[in-house]
Structure formats: C-alpha cells, structure tokens
Amino acid sequence: MILVSACLLGLNCRFNGRSKATESLISSLKNTHTVPFCPEQLGGLPTPRYRAWITHGDGMDVLEGRARVINEVGADVTSQFIKGTAETEKLVTLFNIKKAYLKSKSPSCGVGKIYRNKKLVTGNGVCATMLIQKNIKPISV
C-alpha cells in the first residue's frame, strides 16, 4: 500500500481549503492501492486553517520537544501536528505502508525542504520525519 498526501490526489484539505492535484501522480497511481491522508486534519485542525511554520529546527525537533509549530496568527498548533503524525503512524501499521508520496514544503509532509518562520530551509516536516524513522522513504511531490 502507498500513503499519499490527500491534497495531491485532488482532495481539498490544504491550509487554504484547496487541493494541489498532481495529474501525473494520479495517473501513475491508478492501478495501485493508495491510502490518502492529511496529517493536519488527522490532528484535528480545520480546513481551511491558518498557515503554520516550524519555529526552528525541523520535524525531528518538534517530535523531540525542542521546537514548536506556530500558525500565522501566533497560535501554537504543535499538539495537533504531533497528534496527526501519531494517527498517520497508525495508518502505516494498519495498511503495512512501504512507500509515501508527500506534499513538498509542508510543515507536516515536507521532505528535504520546509518553511521555518516563513523562510524555505533544509529539513523535513513532522510527519515526514516519522516516516523516515519507520524506514519509509517519502517522495516529495
């Protein structure tokens, strides 16, 4: 089974209430078993929602309690990001996930690049970090 950021499949779950449908990815996954997910929604955040950033470090720092996730109006949404990651981990186990396609630059799903305090930097999102820890190599889309 393949885990896929739901927004990449055309589901309107991004912070702005829209999707980021990626037709080439959708076509390549047509005959596969996929599990669409949005860790931010799984963590209890609404759609639409305020944009959020990791304060310093990256997803590993958030999971280890050294960094926070703060939204654009200053609310701390760290607990929702951690909860969404934990819920995603349940999906990984339940569906024996071996591969994941994740939305690039997201504080949850970003692989290799994320926004930190509104600036694009090197790092992984909170959920992407968990997948890497589970030996699942996430692919950034």
Image: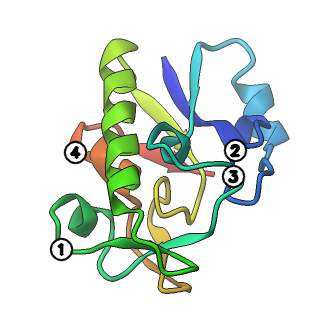
| Structural crowding at the residue carrying mark 4, measured as other residues with C-alpha within 10 Å and reported as few (<14), some (14–19) or many (≥20) | few
In the image, taking residue 49 as reference, residue 126 lies left or right, namely left
Q: Earlier in the sequence, mark 4 or mark 2?
A: 2
Gap between marks 3 and 4, in whole Å?
25 Å
Query: Do tag 2 and tag 3 residues touch (Cβ < 8 Å)?
Result: yes
* Place of residue 115 in the rendered image (x, y in percent of width and height, measured from the top left): 51, 77
Residue under the point 32% across and 24% down? 90
* Place of residue 36 in the rendered image (x, y in percent of width and height, measured from the top left): 60, 28
**For the residue marked with disc 1, what is the amino acid?**
Arg
* Place of residue 41 in the rendered image (x, y in percent of width and height, measured from the top left): 55, 42
| Residue topped by disc 2 | 13
| Structural crowding at the residue carrying mark 1, measured as other residues with C-alpha within 10 Å and reported as few (<14), some (14–19) or many (≥20) | few
Gap between marks 3 and 1, in whole Å?
26 Å
Q: Earlier in the sequence, mark 3 or mark 4?
A: 3
| Residue topped by disc 4 | 133
| Disc number lying in front (4 or 2) | 2
Q: Earlier in the sequence, mark 4 or mark 1?
A: 1
